Amino acid sequence: MRITEVETYHLRLPQVAAECNGTQDALLVRVHTDVGLIGIGEVDSSPHVIRAVFDAPYSHTLAAGLRHLLIGEDPRDIERLWEKMYRGTLYFGRRGAAIHAISGVDIALWDLLGKATGLPVYQLLGGAYCRRMPAYASDLMPATPEEAYDRAAALCDAGFRYVKLGWGGLGQSEAQDVALARAARRGIGEENALMIDAGLCWDAATAIARVRRLEDLDLTWVEEPLPPDDLGGYARLADAVDTRIAAGEELATCWEFCDLMDRGRIDVVQVDVSRAGGLTEARRIAHLARQRNLPCVPHAYSTGVLLAASLHWAASLPNGWLVEYTVEESPLATGLTGTGLLREPLRAVEGYLTVPEAPGLGIELDEEMVARFRVA
């Protein structure tokens, strides 16, 4: 079996709002083979930038586009191809956009391997520790306490027992941050779990003061209160508060995650498999987290393709915990009523996601939806 083509599909809503919302555009990857099998992957990044990483012609042994590196290769050689792509993009890669692009290919290769062997990806990754993963409803924080209360309550009424609200109305003032978090806690009640995503909006001193003010809310975690490179600040924060600190969605490769775990001393390791290096690198990161007795929770705020890959990965981990489930009502996301671009969407039922059993990722794209939102 050989790779014959690598396609990228840029999908975008007609109107894109100025907000931290990953469901407004997407980049899908299709890896074609000479036996007719096609693997599907996704990159949650800047689609225009990522397409350049795929399309760039050969410039140098350490500077080549991914398509050039992949065509003619055996797609079953997943780890070897990961190293070939990593080395072939060293001059402009090593982190960031190049690793994001590699991630999309890697997810597609695992999907291909599953289709070639007749096995679901979670089995190829070592087997599922559970077939039903608890999902947390993930949404933007509303602008007012009243709206935060209503949204949190509605998500619990929809069956979720874990709710995360972030970005949006947070970061304007201490009084506003505290009021929004307290309103959300009242909305979900004391029996359910609440997480707050601060959205990189504080410095270390502010984060310490803010998290201390919220500790009576028994938050499951506070997510990304600091910029991803402020490892010293993360360490100060983690040492100063009792609430778990979660981070990692901007990071790429196990090297960056080792720094975040060891120097930043975070409590919850959040890997986006479409940015960190695909399922291959996400599995390495999870092993490193397990050595440190830290739980892994995937970041997955995009389409159903990323959700499926994240679900297979999380289910295959002894230190897997939860799966992020975006409830954003975007045509590109599953939400509470959408499809997430899939013919059979992955829907949370009573707060749980069931891992697909079909070969590969176990998903099929809704081609009409792809064509509707594809950028020419």
Image (tube, rainbow, N blue to C red):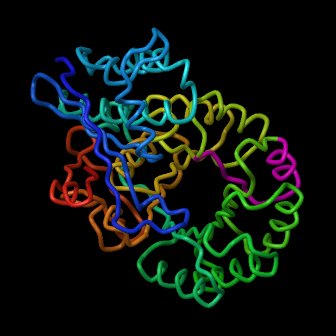
Q: Residue at the far top: name it.
A: 61
Rendering coords of residue 71 (x, y %): 25, 19
Count of marks placed on residues: 0
> Against 255, is 352 above or below?
below
Residue at screen point 42% across, 39% down:
316
Q: Of residues 244 and 16, which is closer to you in this image? A: 16
Q: Of residues 48 and 204, which is closer to you in this image? A: 48
Location of the N terminus (image quadrant):
top left
Left or right: 336 with respect to 5?
A: right
Q: Which residues are magenta?
A: 232-249
Residue at screen point 54% across, 18% down:
90
Rendering coords of residue 168 (x, y %): 61, 72
Left or right: 57 with respect to 113?
A: right
Task: Kindly indicate the quadrant of the structure image that contains residue 125.
Answer: top left
Q: Residue at the far bottom: name it.
A: 146
Left or right: 173 with respect to 223?
A: right
> Against 218, is 34 above or below?
above
Residue 235 located within the stretch drawn in magenta? yes
Left or right: 135 with respect to 111?
A: right
Residue 231 located within the stretch drawn in magenta? no
Rendering coords of residue 180 (x, y %): 69, 80
Q: Of residues 57 and 25, which is closer to you in this image? A: 57
> Against 345, is 257 above or below?
above
Rendering coords of residue 237 (x, y %): 84, 53
Residue at screen point 38% across, 41% down:
128
Residue at screen point 72% across, 56% down:
244
